[in-house]
Image (tube, rainbow, N blue to C red):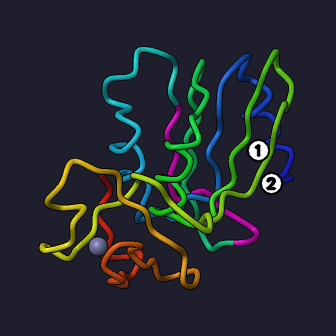
Amino acid sequence: MEQNKENMMVAALENGSVIDHIPTDKLFTVAQLLQLSECKEEVVIANNLKSNVMNKKGLIKISGKFFSESEISKLAVLCPNIRLTVIRNYEVAEKREVTLPESLTNIVKCANPVCITNNEPMKTVFYRKDMQTLKCRYCGKEQNLKDIKLK
Ligand SMILES: [Zn+2]
């Protein structure tokens, strides 16, 4: 039944993206990251939906929106286990679990104030140490995902 309802919500979209399995406490942070308050297209934001895999979840549906890899990486840093569905002509064109990539270029800031990336006009590079920790390529500082600042 749950699955049918989800399919109906997705099917109603002609072209666009659906972000599912958003932790309920991250929903509005994600909405802010995606600048949804500026969006002129049809947007559906739902929270505290019942979920089989999580206790409760958030969901965002955006008409006419296709995410860049950089936006997807930012989403992955913010909530590492979301599901992204891309809809084209009312059909599911792509469905993927978004997980933390092995490396992130210019997605997050280094927390070390003396790191070269904070003092020179250059891109940051972070490696995934584990699913909770990123490590700066330049100064080696490790940072927990929950404390990370996006660029
Ligand atoms: Zn650094």
Task: Give me the residue at 62% from left, 68% from top.
Answer: 102
**In the image shown, does 95 or 47 lie closer to the viewer?**
95
Query: Badges 1 and 2: C-beta atoms under 8 Å apart?
Result: yes
Disc 1 on helix, strand or loop?
Answer: helix
The tag on residue 83 is: none
Image check: 63 left or right of 74?
Answer: right
Q: Is mark 2 within 8 Å of ligand 1?
A: no
Instruction: Identify which amino acid the numbered label 2 is placed on.
Output: Glu
Specify start and end residues of the magenta stretch as a single range. Answer: 44-53
The tag on residue 6 is: 1
Task: Give me the residue at 41% from left, 14% from top.
Answer: 40
**In the image shown, does 117 or 62 lie closer to the viewer?**
117
Task: Give me the residue at 32% from left, 56% from top.
Answer: 150
Q: Is residue 46 magenta?
A: yes
Q: CA distance from mark 1 to mark 2?
A: 6 Å
Q: Label 2, on which residue?
A: 2
Residue 4, position as x, y percentages in the image: 86, 44
Image check: 7 left or right of 133?
Answer: right
Residue 67, position as x, y percentages in the image: 58, 34
Taken as a whole, is the magenta stretch helix, strand or loop?
A: strand
Q: Residues within 10 Å of mark 1 (few under 14, many from 20)?
A: few
Instruction: Classify residue 117 by image quadrant.
Output: bottom left
Instruction: Identify which amino acid the numbered label 1 is placed on.
Output: Glu
Q: Residues within 10 Å of mark 2 (few under 14, many from 20)?
A: few
